[in-house]
Image: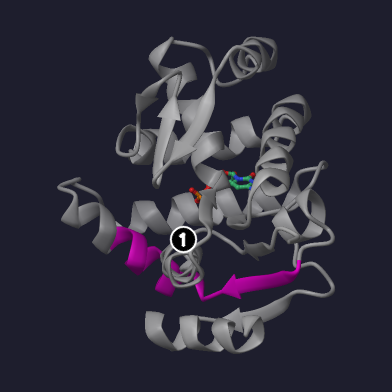
Amino acid sequence: MKNVVIAVDGPAGAGKSTVAKIIAKKLNINYIDTGAMYRAITYKAIKENINIGDEKALIEIAKNTQIDFKENNIYLDGKIVNEEIRTPEVSNNVSKVAQIREIREIMVDLQRKMGQKYSVIMDGRDIGSYVFKNADFKFYLTAGVNERAIRRYKELKEKGYDVKLDDIIKDIEIRDEIDSKREFAPLIKADDAIEIDTSNKNIDEVVEEMMKYIN
Ligand code: C5P
C-alpha cells in the first residue's frame, strides 16, 4: 500500500506539533517534527561555538550531522536532544540557520526519504508547499500572535524557564518574519492546504476538524 503523507504547516506556536502527535497516534503512523531538525543543527552550532553568521561553518555542521527520529525522540549524532533543542537560545537563532539554502536542502532530502519509507504526519513551514507538494492531506494552522506567544510562554514556564511574555512575542514575530521572507522555501500556505485558525479552538476541536478531512 502507498505511504500516506500528511503535511501540517504554519507559524510558530499555532499548535501544529500537539495536534500532529495526536493524529499520528490515532492513525498509527510516524510523527516527524521538522522544526526539531533545524533546531538540532542550531543547538550543535551553539555548542561548538560557531558564529550564527558564519554560513560556511553552519553548512559544514549540517553536512556532518546525523539526525534520526525514533519513538518521538530526536537523536543528534546518536544522542537524544529533545529538551536541549527547545531552549530560548536555540529558538532565538534557529530561523537564521534555517534560511540557509544548503542546510534546507540537506534537511529536505532527509524528510523526503522518511516520507518514502513510511507513512508520516510531518509538521513544519514548507512541507505542503515544497517538501511534499503531492502530500495526501495538507493543513495550514494559524492563530493570532498573542495567542501563540501565550501558549509558548506557558510551555516554557512549565519547564522551569524564567521567560517574559514580551520576549516571546518578539521572538515569534522575528521568526515569522524571517521564515516567511526567506528566499528559498519560505513559510507559505500551499494553495491546496486546508487552513484552520486555532485561536479559539481547543486541541480536541482542531484534531476533530482535521480528522474529518482525513477520514
Ligand atoms: O516548529 P519550530 O517552531 O520548532 O521550528 C523552529 C524553526 O525551524 C522555525 O522558526 C523555522 O525557522 C525553522 N523551520 C523551517 N522549516 C521547517 C520547520 C522549521 O524553516 N519545515
Residue at 25% x, 63% y is 154
Q: Is residue 113 above or below residue 115?
A: above
Q: Position of residue 112 (x, y in %)?
A: 73, 42
Relative placement, left or right, of 43 versus 157 is right
Which picture quadrant has residue 74?
top left
Q: Position of residue 144 (x, y in %)?
A: 51, 75
Q: Is residue 210 above or below residue 186?
A: below
Which picture quadrant has residue 148?
bottom left
Q: Is residue 207 visible?
A: yes
**Amino acid type for the residue under numbered disc 1:** Ser
Residue at 26% x, 52% y is 156
Question: Which residue is identified by label 1?
Answer: 17
Q: Is residue 158 above or below residue 58?
A: below
Q: Helix or strand or loop: what does disc 1 sit on? A: helix
Relative placement, left or right, of 13 versus 59 is left
Q: Is residue 202 visible?
A: no
Q: Quadrant of the C terminus?
A: bottom right
Residue at 38% x, 54% y is 168
Q: Is residue 40 above or below residue 186?
A: above
Q: Quadrant of the N terminus?
A: bottom right
Q: Which residues are magenta?
A: 136-153
Q: Is 29 colored magenta in this rendering? A: no
Q: Is 144 colored magenta in this rendering? A: yes
Q: Nearer the viewer, residue 163 or 43?
A: 43
Residue at 48% x, 83% y is 206
Relative placement, left or right, of 149 versus 93 is left
Q: Is mark 1 within 8 Å of ligand 1?
A: yes
Q: Position of residue 96 (x, y in %)?
A: 61, 33
